[in-house]
Amino acid sequence: MGANARRSYGSGSLFEKADSAGRVSWYGKWRNGGTQVKRRIGPKRAEGSRDGLTRRAAEAELRRLIAEVRPYVPTAEALTVAEVGRRYVVHLERAGRKLSTRTAVRSALRVHLEPFFGERAIGTVTHEDVVDLMKLMESNGVGPKSIRNYLGTLSALYRFSMHPRRRWATVNPCDGLELPAVPDHVGIRYLELDQVDALVANAQSGPYEALDRALYRTASMTGLRLGELIALRWRDVDWTASAIRVRSSYVLGEFGTPKSKRSLRSVPMADEVAGELERYSKANGELREEALVFADPRHGGPLDKAAVLRRLRKSLRAAGLDEAHRFHDLRHTFGTAMAAAGVPMRTLQEWMGHRDIETTQRYADYAPRARDAELVAAAFARGVPDPSVAPVAS
């Protein structure tokens, strides 16, 4: 049978297809209740290789898929991708999902999914359509991580649509998608201690000067995110335990729980931070425990993030520092300083509220390595080993 030979109706057909990198895969297509289904079966085995699928193995997998996929039954509602998206956002809201999550879904729908699929019914979108969307995003310069997020949203729409109570779609065309690889990580930017001092000293004069001084110092020496700092209340500052407790965050104009469960945490409060906060609190008079630490001095409510960033750029310029620094770089300042001080990665993960240790591992390169060269030299030393160099524990 040829590479693209047709078989009897209902048994489907098997064909080969190469991607942009030249990798060849087996694909199958068949009719399912009047609808054509296309699926990637798996990589084709090259001659002389043991990896991938032979034609016989691909045929068997195709038969399994044909038997597994439920017959398509048209529903009373042939909903478009856009309409399913709107219903999915309502579902997320009822399920108590964060505003930031719902906003990200709306953004993916508005910017990429709705313009591409138009008025297509969600049950008619194929795997090839999704591949075409991915290629379009790549050609438009969308980064690998963003592409993964957007297609993750699309896949979530299908899981929502395929629920037995809905059945607006019977197949998830995102299944088996070869997503673009995401680089391990790019270099992080941070400030040295003297640069933090310069930034604090150059806080812009005016009603926000004392607040910004305390804000920059606290951010750099606790690693709190900007949203966590804006939501911080005086009751969260534990003077006795020398700790700051992170219980909430301010995101998209709303107070809510921090980014993840691990973000609910306690962070050690250095003496410099305690001193800065104490001076700031005394300058503001007697403050209630439930009051915001960094309340806007003009109206007493939450700070405006855009205004904070504008003042940060001016302070960086006045301090002679690179204006391209982001507020988040102050969080990186804490991470790199703690790693350089020898704080174990697991402890640093807890302090920074990272969900995954892989995120914290970015700071491992800054861990102290002062004696590494000595240890290597001792290992290759001729004659009597240097007794001042302690052996490395196994």
Image (cartoon, rainbow, N blue to C red):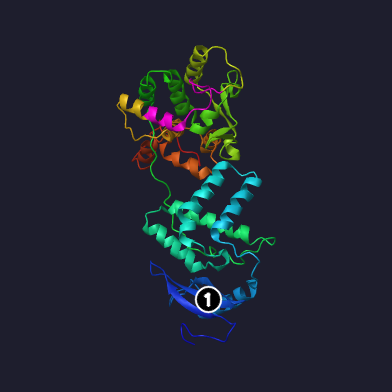
Residue 93 percent coordinates (x, y) = 62, 46
Question: Can the viewer see residue 149?
Answer: no
Circle count: 1
**Depth order, front residue of 39/130:** 130
- In the rendered image, which residue does mark 1 sit on? 28
Does residue 20 appear to the left or right of 101 in the view shown?
A: left
Does residue 167 appear to the left or right of 7 in the view shown?
A: right
Residue appearing at x 42%, y 46% in the figure: 185
Residue 281 percent coordinates (x, y) = 52, 15
User: What residue type is disc 1 on?
Assistant: Gly
Residue appearing at x 53%, y 81% in the figure: 13
Residue 63 percent coordinates (x, y) = 60, 78
Main secondary structure found in the magenta portion: loop
Q: Which residues are magenta?
A: 292-312
Q: Quadrant of residue 264?
A: top right
Secondary structure beneath dot 1 equals strand
**Depicted 354 relative to depicted 175: above or below:** above
Q: Is residue 34 magenta?
A: no
**Depicted 389 relative to depicted 240: above or below:** below
Q: For mark 1, does the 10 Å Cα neighbourhood hold few (<14), some (14 to 19), or many (20 or more) residues?
A: many
Residue 259 percent coordinates (x, y) = 56, 39
Residue at the right extreme of this rendering:
165
Q: Quadrant of residue 47?
A: bottom left
Question: Can the viewer see residue 269?
Answer: yes
Residue at the left extreme of this rendering:
320
Q: Is residue 294 magenta?
A: yes
**Depth order, front residue of 376/295:** 295
